[in-house]
Image (tube, rainbow, N blue to C red):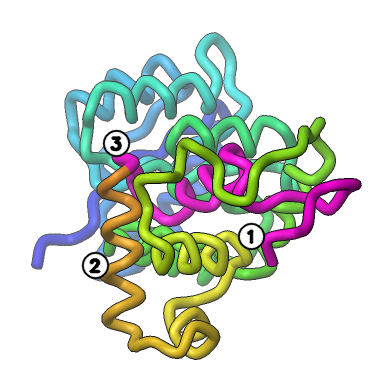
Amino acid sequence: MPPISVLLADDQPMIRTGFRYILEAEPDIEVVGEAADGREAVEETRRLSPDIVLMDIRMPQTDGVEATRLIVESGLPARVIILTTFDLDQHVVDALRAGASSFLVKDGPADSLVAAIRTVADGEAVLAPRVTRRLLDRFAGMPWEAAPPVPPRLDVLTGRELDVLRTLARGLSNAEIAAELRIGETTVKTHIAHILEKFHLRDRVQAVILAYDSGLVGPPHAGHRPAW
């Protein structure tokens, strides 16, 4: 198999050099280019067609959120991993909504960076449960309005697909979903694939956001029972 091709997008040369040093030590990963701002990141993604773009969220001119949106909307196959100095802020949520597959904190361990690249490249863009929890906590701090038990936007889903989406939004793995719903892991994967297909979502991170934005899950308040 060809190596996973990666584009580094960060306005700090030393950061790019550090990431390149880490990634080029891996036999299955190849750094194919660099970009110093979001505009250049979009241009280089179009030119090089990398598998993964490591995208700094805060850059001059075009920031990482807008660059992610442009890459996703253009239909380019590259998947975006957001790099942030802060654990989780509004810009990260915006980037995930724009189509980013995951996010990493810049000062995290090197093995987390490598593992994330391999995971996202495999199409299994899964936020770890603790990260999903922080994401949901961030949503919980946003204004919320009462929603029906099954929002109209989700009426194309079967009952079992709704069950899977609810558990997925809690950050459960396929094995955990299978155990909770008492179905096979293969069946779980099939339901998730159907959910992604019906809503034209890139990965399960986007499905988590769909569940929250649609009102299927949300923070408890008067008149609304938590979906989990």
Residue on which the image places disc 1: 132
Q: Which mark is residue 19?
A: none
Secondary structure, mark 1, is helix
Residue neighbourhood size for the residue with mark 2, other residues' Cα within 10 Å, grouped as few (<14), some (14–19), many (≥20): some
Q: Spatial distance from mark 3 to mark 2, Cα to Cα? A: 16 Å
Task: From the image, state whether disc 1 or disc 2 is nearer to you.
Answer: 1
Classify residue 155 as left or right of residue 58. left
User: What is the three-letter code of the residue carrying label 3?
Assistant: Gly
Q: x and y percent of residue 27 in the render?
A: 25, 70
Q: Spatial distance from mark 1 to mark 2, Cα to Cα? A: 28 Å
Classify residue 56 as left or right of residue 107. left
Which span of residues is magenta-colored? Answer: 199-228
Q: Does the CB distance between marks 1 and 2 fall below 8 Å? A: no
Q: Which one is in front, 67 or 29?
A: 67
Is 157 a magenta residue?
Answer: no
The part of the image, by quadrant, that contains residue 33 is: top left
Residue on which the image places disc 3: 33
Q: Which one is in front, 83 or 167?
A: 167
Query: Residue, x 46% and y 67% (percent of image)?
Result: 164
**Total residue callouts:** 3
Is 222 a magenta residue?
Answer: yes
Query: Seen from this angle, which residue lies furthest top?
Result: 61
Query: Residue, x 72% and y 45% (percent of image)?
Result: 88
Q: Which one is in front, 111 or 63?
A: 63
User: What is the three-letter code of the residue carrying label 2?
Assistant: Asp
Query: Residue, x 26% and y 69% (percent of image)?
Result: 190
Query: Which quadrant of the rendered structure holds the C terminus?
Result: bottom right
Q: Which mark is residue 28?
A: 2
Q: x and y percent of residue 163 in the render?
A: 50, 67
Secondary structure, mark 3, is strand
Secondary structure, mark 2, is loop
